[in-house]
Amino acid sequence: SSVKISNFDMRFEQDEEAKYTAVSFGNSENSEPIVDDLSQVQKDGDTLKIVSRLVTVLFDKTSFDVKGNAYLVFKNATRRLATAPVQSLRSAQETTQGDSAGDVEFSMDVTLKKATGNVASKSANNSGIVVFTVGGITVVAILFLVIKKMNK
């Protein structure tokens, strides 16, 4: 692609109301986006991956929208077509690296599914092991005392 994302914002919305903003626009035209403490942006070449935790308020309903805007710039000096005034002909027009290529709005609907079935917590399993171990040691101690009394 001949364009790249120069700046963007991303927010989580429910019922057209912003509930959480994961990434905000940078302060100036050439600055990087500002990332919230619960999110991070991972760059791999021209690909951006945004990882964010979901805030509690999003679980009040079964879905939410991820929305935002991205500003695009040309990566390299290229030639693009421009309409010439004579008979709708097109002519080549030079662009320079960093020129604006426009902005684009993005949106994605996310549906939440609740876990089904019984999910045992790890602490419940640990307390069961402790009770079983203490009970086993108690039974062995009682048997030891009974056998010792019988031998006297």
Image: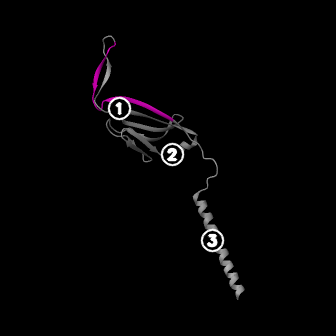
The amino acid sitting under disc 3 is Val
- Pinpoint residue 71: horizontal percent, then vertical percent: 37, 33
In terms of secondary structure, where does tag 1 sit?
Answer: strand
Three-letter residue code for mark 1? Val
Q: Residue furthest right?
A: 150
Which span is picked out in magenta?
88-108
Q: Position of residue 7 (x, y in %)?
A: 37, 36
The numbered mark at residue 64 is none
**Local secondary structure at mark 2:** loop
Question: Is residue 38 rendered magenta in the image?
Answer: no
Relative side of 97 to 104, left or right:
left
The quarter of the picture where residue 63 lies is: top right
Please name the residue that numbered disc 2 is placed on: 55
Q: Residue at x 64, y 49 (%)?
A: 117
How packed mark 2 is, by other alpha carbons closer than 10 Å (few <14, some 14-19, many 20 or more), is few
| First reached walking from the N terminus: tag 2 or tag 3 | 2
Q: Which residue is mark 3?
A: 134
Mark 1 and mark 3 lie on one chain; the one further toward the N terminus is: 1
Proximity of marks 2 and 3: CB atoms separated by less than 8 Å: no
